[in-house]
Image (spheres, rainbow, N blue to C red):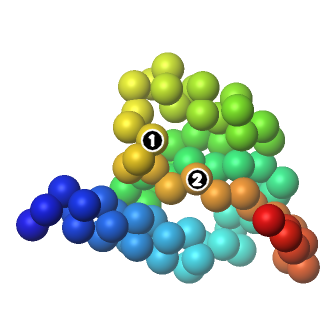
């Protein structure tokens, strides 16, 4: 299995975990960015730049971590 396929599977697993646990996550991390690795929240911060810096200091490979913003229900972002 190629490393790209492994990475894609990890992201799908983390995305699925995020979706299925959203209710509990939003209660604890509302309006924050969270970092998910292996179906576990490993860091959180209201500022994306601070979260990324924390992950870099921990030596994390950012390409293997799912980062999501935990918005209140009904919040919409237009990018």
Q: Residue at x 77, y 49 (%)?
A: 32
Give percent across and percent down for residue 63: 41, 47
Check the image and report above or below for 20 versus 51.
below
Check the image and report above or below for 31 versus 78.
above
Residue carrying label 2: 67
Extreme residue toward the front, this view: 79
Q: Earlier in the sequence, mark 2 or mark 1?
A: 1
Position of 4 with respect to 62 (left or right) is: left
In this orientation, does residue 28 appear?
A: no
Give percent across and percent down for residue 22: 66, 72
- Is disc 2 in contact with disc 1, using a CB cutoff of under 8 Å? yes
Q: What SS does tag 2 mark?
A: strand
Give percent across and percent down for residue 57: 49, 20
Give percent across and percent down for residue 66: 50, 56
- Quarter of the image where the N terminus is located: bottom left
Q: Nearer the viewer, residue 79 or 69?
A: 79
In this orientation, does residue 26 appear?
A: yes
**Which quadrant of the figure has residue 58?**
top left
- Quarter of the image where the C terminus is located: bottom right
Residue carrying label 1: 62
Separation (CA) of disc 2 from disc 1: 9 Å
- Packing grade of label 2 (10 A; few <14, some 14-19, many >=20) is many
- Packing grade of label 1 (10 A; few <14, some 14-19, many >=20) is few
Q: Nearer the viewer, residue 42 or 65?
A: 65
Check the image and report above or below for 53 versus 27.
above
């Amino acid at each position: 299995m190629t490393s790209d396929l492994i990475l894609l599977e990890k992201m799908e697993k983390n995305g699925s975990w995020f979706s299925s646990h959203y209710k509990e996550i939003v209660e604890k991390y509302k309006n924050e960015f969270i970092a998910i690795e292996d179906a576990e929240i490993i860091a959180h911060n209201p500022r994306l730049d601070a979260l990324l810096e924390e992950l870099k200091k921990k030596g994390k490979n950012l390409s293997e971590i799912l980062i999501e913003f935990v918005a209140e229900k009904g919040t919409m972002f237009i990018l």
